[in-house]
């Protein structure tokens, strides 16, 4: 039986927690937004903004659900030291880097300056640092070896 390191376990648990919180968010957010829109005494401008947020959220729910489910699958697969989970994790990490950079390049958030630019820079740095940490950790030889097939294994 292969031994799973503490680091792999920590990342797996983080992905599972993130997936569960993501599922809760996907299920609860539309209801909460609709309740806020229908609340008495809400200003028309705020109601319009909330409707826009709800429409945007609902239009992206499919891709968000795929991301959440992939994260859950990675977490469970890492706990079981499955090679597919290692590959999926690295693929998702690479995709995250590409999408982060593409999002910054196309959003125009940095051009607006002010608080929006600061928040964008912080989010980008955090996202890229997280992706870098994952890529570094999971490509270390001592971690990669945990996901190799062993004779007689069912992987």
Image (tube, rainbow, N blue to C red):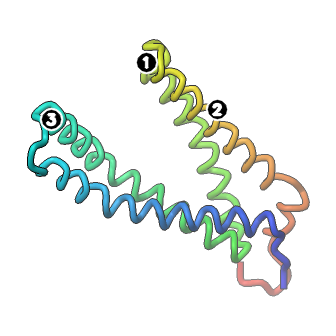
Question: In terms of sequence position, does the residue under pointer 2 or pointer 1 come before the other?
Answer: 1
Residues at discs 3 and 1 in contact (Cβ within 8 Å): no
Secondary structure at badge 2 equals helix
How far from the left and from the top, in percent, is residue 108?
43, 18
Rounded to the nearest whole Å, what is the CA distance between mark 2 and mark 1? Answer: 16 Å
Pointer 2 local density, CA inside 10 Å: few below 14, some 14–19, many at least 20: few
Question: In terms of sequence position, does the residue under pointer 2 or pointer 3 come before the other?
Answer: 3
Q: Which residue is mark 2?
A: 125
Q: Nearer the viewer, mark 3 or mark 1?
A: 3
Quarter of the figure that contains the N terminus? bottom right
Q: Which residue is mark 1?
A: 108
Secondary structure at badge 3 equals helix
Secondary structure at badge 1 equals loop
Q: How many marks?
A: 3
| Residue 100 image-quadrant placement | top right
- Relative to 98, residue 82 above or below: below
């Amino acid at each position: 039986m292969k031994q799973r390191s503490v680091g792999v376990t920590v990342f797996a648990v983080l992905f599972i927690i993130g997936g569960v919180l993501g599922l809760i968010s996907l299920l609860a957010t539309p209801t909460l937004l609709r309740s806020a829109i229908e609340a008495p005494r809400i200003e028309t401008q705020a109601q319009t903004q909330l409707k826009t947020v709800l429409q945007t959220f609902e239009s992206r729910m499919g891709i968000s659900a795929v991301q959440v489910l992939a994260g859950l699958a990675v977490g469970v697969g890492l706990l079981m030291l499955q090679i597919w989970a290692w590959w999926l994790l690295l693929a998702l990490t690479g995709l995250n880097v590409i999408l982060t950079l593409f999002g910054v390049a196309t959003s125009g958030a940095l051009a607006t300056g002010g608080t929006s630019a600061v928040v964008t820079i912080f989010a980008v740095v955090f996202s890229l640092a997280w992706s870098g940490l994952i890529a570094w950790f999971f490509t270390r030889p001592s971690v990669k070896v945990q996901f190799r097939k062993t004779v007689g294994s069912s992987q």
